[in-house]
Image (spheres, rainbow, N blue to C red):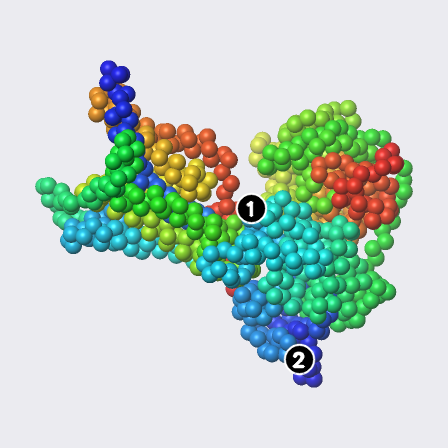
Amino acid sequence: MEEIKVNDYAVVMKNIVKEFYDVRANDNVNFLVKNGSIHGLLGENGAGKTTLMNVLYGLYHPEEGEIFINGIKQDIHSPTKAISLGIGMVHQHFMLARPFTIVENVMLGRKSRKGILLDTKETAKDLVALAEKYKMKIDPYAKIWQLSVGEQQRVEILTALYQGAEVLILDEPTAVLTPQEVDGLFVTLREMKNDGKSIILITHKLEEIVCIVDEVTVLRDGAMIGNVEVDCNTTKAELTKMMVGRDVLFNFEKSNSAAGEKKLTIKDLKVLNDKNFLALDGFSLDVHAGEIIGLAGVDGNGQKELCEALTGIRTVESGEVKLDTINIENKPPLFSIKKGIAHIPEDRHITGLALGWSLKKNLILKTFKDNSKFGLIDEKKIEDRWEKARVAYQIKANSGDDSARDLSGGNQQKVILARELENNPVILIANQPTRGLDIGATEYVRQKLLDAKGDGAGVLLVSADLEEILQLSDRIAVIYDGKLMGILPGGSDVKKIGELMMGKKLEVEQNAK
Amino acid sequence: MLSNIFTVSFFVSLLASTIRLATPILLPALGQIYTQRAGILNLSVEGTMTIGAVAGFAATYYSGSLWLGILMGMAFGMLYSLLMAVLSVTLRANQVIAGTALNILGIGLAVFFYRVIFGIQSLPPQVEPFQMLKIPFLSEIPVIGVILFQHNIIVYLSFVMVVITWFILEKTTFGLKIKAVGENPKAADSKGVNVSKYRYFAVLIGGIYAGAAGAFMSIAYLNIFTESIIGGRGFIAVAVVIFARFLPIRAMWGALLFGVASALQLRLQALGIDVANQLMLMLPYALTIIALVLASKKADFPSAYAIPYSRKER
């Protein structure tokens, strides 16, 4: 490392070691960002990307290693220090106080020009000017909860810039955006690069950033694997291999078997969200046997409420849900479970699993009665059940008595799959089934969804990940603001889906089923 | 009979004493607005007020200075709430349990020190309390003058604090940071706000207000100290904050509601209305609870309410 001239780089991180208890999240990582460049930091979930950036931002303290900013060695012990060195970070989960206005959120991170009083007006004026400079539009007095995800991201970027960021870290910035919003973001990032700022993009999806980054650093299992210059023509396969450590075949056999008869009918569904606003506003959709219908949409447009209404967890205000000819809306969850509706919930830690419980018990959460004798749990039966699931789903765990908390995300999801796919469901509702999983587990879960379809299940795949939707779906439905915007055939153009995701109506092909 | 009750002078004295009785609710409630806005639910306000009452009383008794009494009430209130801050912020204890325990401890300590200092006397020791301060000219206005401008100085100051508290929370950087650590401590942290520091401030400010209110009870409202001098006002104050959706102006209305019920109850008893006095005593508390139930459904709690913060490091 000594031969590196630290002066040529905006950021030099040398031999960084960061440990959590006994796990090495960063193992002697070297990370260099050239002045005025856009740098990708690539790796799977859990590879240590975010940890490394949190070290740079002063949120974590490394056990070993040195950091140079603009050629000068620095000890970054807090975010305040990082900010004063011109480092800004846009976190994956936005760091915004939702009841506050934009300008209040911005003022939180800086000294007021009026001493102890807030300089709201001045800051608001500066913000609007700054936003214009980087081709963004904002209303500084809007409250955060009123903003779309893309707008919230803009607020985060503006906050960092206003704090004087010369190096801007963005953690998975494209994951939550529609394709059009991604284009807008890239326009802003290019403006910033032209201004001489350095940008670090953390991502586990290379293809989304390949055209904008100059260089990519790949992390795997906490270690640095390589540093590659890339452009639009760089192929995915090579870098994916670096990330995962083996070849990944993302080409699933998509059997184009004709869809079967109509199984699930959703008609004019109206459902309230937790704040008593309409989350679903007259939503209609059919799911047929033996098909995967992908429901695309930006998070928070009613997807969660839809899944909950379909599984009996949320009250339906009006409209109906029919399985074959039976109405299932506003029936207890057990009713729809018995009728063969399976559900992979959005958040496996909250609704998917009882984290403190054993794997065995998690497996039989829905079938306690079938696994008990005279009201007592039949230990032998559930041990058998566990053993079968472990083999069939390749769950890596020491024993069925381990608590669910101790498993990796991928293995947790396998436990849920084993539970939900037992007894071949008629309808499978999969809400963000691969969110937060590494590539290997993602591959596995997607294959299982295709298998379920092959076994005749109608699969409703809810995902904010367009790549996933396109890969698996026979038909693609788009939800926006609680309404169905339209249904497109599988393999449709991403831009077209993106437009629907932003609320543009589909004009012609309403009956493109 | 009824015409005897509802005379102008009855209403004037009712409303005047409403304002006086609202003060020991208003003061701790204003303090708890800081505390709860910062995400800390401090249930030991009652105990803290009792400590403030004994500290204020003892200081005034021996020095003869009422202002020293108020000051000591504030100082000991702050000192005692430091315990809550350590437990809830540094040690990240469950706030309901920590607060409940500290509440019992606080009342116990206050009574213990009262005994140690004053021993057991046949006649309880007394102090000369704060006198009524008639505001020149204004107190001469008929009706309104008597209601609003014939109180002791602490009452006036408490109502001034409503505006000051609002100003601090809405217009200063300090207030913004207090609200931020209660709303999204992670966001505040990432923007360079020291979460622990501001949560400490918030709990200590709550303690100061509660201590002052305690001293108000023993040297301004009454002139003696008794074991049950606070009489649930600390808990009512905590409830008023929630009922007021953490807004100072609304907290004032909440305190006045309790005040008017207390005043009404006292007067009706004095008039010899034929209702069991136990039932009458319940009135202010029952009324406050009913108001709470009706209003609190809409309360938008700070997102990190009663949740300890940790950066998940080391």
Quick one: which residue is furthest to the left in this view? B122
* Left or right: where B48 falls relative to A35: left
Residue B233's place in the image compared with A18, above or below, is above
Q: Which residue is rendered at x = 74% and y = 24% of the image?
A: A326
Residue B102 horizontal/vertical position (percent): 33, 48
Q: Nearer the viewer, residue A239 or A206?
A: A206
Q: Can residue A459 be seen in the rendering of this structure?
A: no
Real-space CA distance between mark 1 and mark 2, rounded to the nearest whole angstrom: 43 Å
Label 2: state its secondary structure.
Answer: helix
**Mark 1 residue type:** Pro
Locate residue A1, reporting x and y percent: 68, 81
- Residue at the extreme top: B1
* Badge 1 or badge 2: first in the primary sequence: 2
Q: How many marks?
A: 2
Q: Are marks 1 and 2 in contact (CB under 8 Å)?
A: no
Q: Which residue, given by chain and number where applicable, does mark 2 sit on?
A: A6
**Disc number placed over residue B197 in the picture, else none:** none
In the rendered structure, which amino acid carries the disc numbered 2?
Val
Which image quarter: residue A385? top right
Q: Within 10 Å of the Cα at label 1, are there few (<14), some (14-19), or many (20+) other Cα atoms? A: some
Q: Is residue B203 above or below residue B240?
A: below
Rendered location of residue A312, percent (x, y)? 66, 32
Q: Closest to the observer: A45 or A128? A: A128
Point 55% across, 60% down: residue: A109
Compared with A251, A16 (above or below) is below
The numbered dot on residue A99 is 1
Dot in front, 1 or 2: 1
